[in-house]
Image (tube, rainbow, N blue to C red):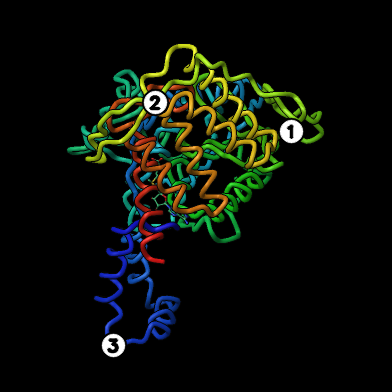
Amino acid sequence: MALSGPQVRRLDERLAARSQGLTPHQYLMFLQSPSGVTDLEDLIAAAVVNKTDLFRDEVQLAAFRAQVLTPLVAKTRRPLRVWSAGCATGEEVATLLVLLAEAGADPDSTVLGTDIAGDTLRRARWLAYSREQLRRVPPELRSSYFVRSGAREALAPALRERASFQCHNLMESPYPVAPGGGGFDVIFCRNVLIYFTEAAFQRTVEALARSLAPGGVLVLSASEPLLRVPPTLRVQRGEQAFFYVRPEEGAAEAPPAQHAWSGAASPPKQRGTAAPPERARTDAHQGLAVVTTPEPGPEARAEADLLFACVLDGAASGVSDAVAERDLRRCLTLDPDHAAARYLLGLLLEQCRRTAEAASEYRRAFQALESGRSRPVAFFLNPDRLRVACAHAAERLEFSVRRR
Ligand SMILES: C[S@@+](CC[C@H](N)C(=O)[O-])C[C@H]1O[C@@H](n2cnc3c(N)ncnc32)[C@H](O)[C@@H]1O
């Protein structure tokens, strides 16, 4: 994990309190022994973020239903095997069970929830929720799939029996096996990888891709786009979300997603009128007078969006980091408050180990979102979560730069 400052502080405090009288080596041995289980769980709880929700990110879920689930149910006509990796307290598992039932999936379809944190899994197994937790569930689904259970509403028994939970660390093999073998039809791993280092992020995506059945689909959150799509996956790009598909065996090699320009072809010309002239403005968030740019005009925005879309397509076809960086910078010259592009530039620079530059891009993306200057763009449909991802990434990198 790439721990942020507060996470490191929390962890340090717990370590200091628990390891008293032992050398670090002795304490490590203790943690690895059966009697260290409680301590280990406590340390994991200090390090992880387990915020989750029923029907989290409805926009992405609606796209998942339309683009992935409905066609999958129509095509497979057998029980589907779904995995929620990093399920926290299990709301995603309940959400997926409801979506499967609504889509008319085979009643023997199953959803496995896994997480590294044992305490969250214990709560996940209840599959019962407070009124506040149910607020995003559409009323008709709430009355069809939840039943009163004391002060809470529990998932209906017919759905509960299709859920199972397991403690699993995504950094360790073996990975869970789908019932009957052959891989999972769908894997959700949302809001987990943003907390990983870049190397761990990439390794986990590759391992998850191997856990998919041919034709299976990996769902990451909107703020975790893949800049390097492993060769085992293809991007399925919709208007509202991206999904990553493991191609069917023997499926014809799909042509690489075409950049609007690639290789020797020239990039779109930047028209002089599109690039905005500089002007002075005070940036309230910096507390400093800085030189910024005026609102880009419609032409500049359109060009910026085209460049941004091309960078995303390029990620699928393996465009080099240098080309992606060039295009993101062009996009940001046209629209400096394009938070999604700036966030992607941060990810790219972080991958290239240009930590201080990456931190600065994350911070600027965060400020553009915070100030309301950033406009919504296709794909990053949930600016709230993009803001959290930017803030977290900036804080994490700034902390690691200070530590050096
Ligand atoms: C923010 S929650 C995401 C929950 C849910 N997927 C969602 O999007 O609402 C992240 C979860 O990932 C889990 N996690 C973090 N590192 C993990 C690892 N190495 N293996 C498995 N789970 C991990 C955390 O314990 C936490 O519960």
Does label 3 point to a residue whose CB lies under 8 Å from ligand 1?
A: no
| Image disc number at residue 278 | 2
Residues 400 and 31: in front is: 400
Total marks drawn? 3
Q: Tell me the mark number nearer the camera, choosing from 2 and 3.
A: 2
**Where residue 199 sits: x, y (%)?**
56, 55
Instruction: Report how far apart the C-alphas of labels 2 and 3 lie in the structure.
Output: 61 Å
**Where residue 398 sits: x, y (%)?**
37, 54
| Image disc number at residue 21 | 3
Quadrant for the N terminus in the image: bottom left
Circles 2, 3 touching at the beta carbon (< 8 Å): no
| Image disc number at residue 336 | none
**Where residue 272 sits: x, y (%)?**
53, 17
- What residue appears at the point 37 percent right and 30 percent down from the top-left corner? 55
Looking at the picture, which amino acid does disc 3 mark? Answer: Gly
Circles 1, 2 touching at the beta carbon (< 8 Å): no
Callout 3 environment at 10 Å: few (<14), some (14 to 19), or many (20+)? few
Looking at the picture, which amino acid does disc 2 mark? Answer: Glu
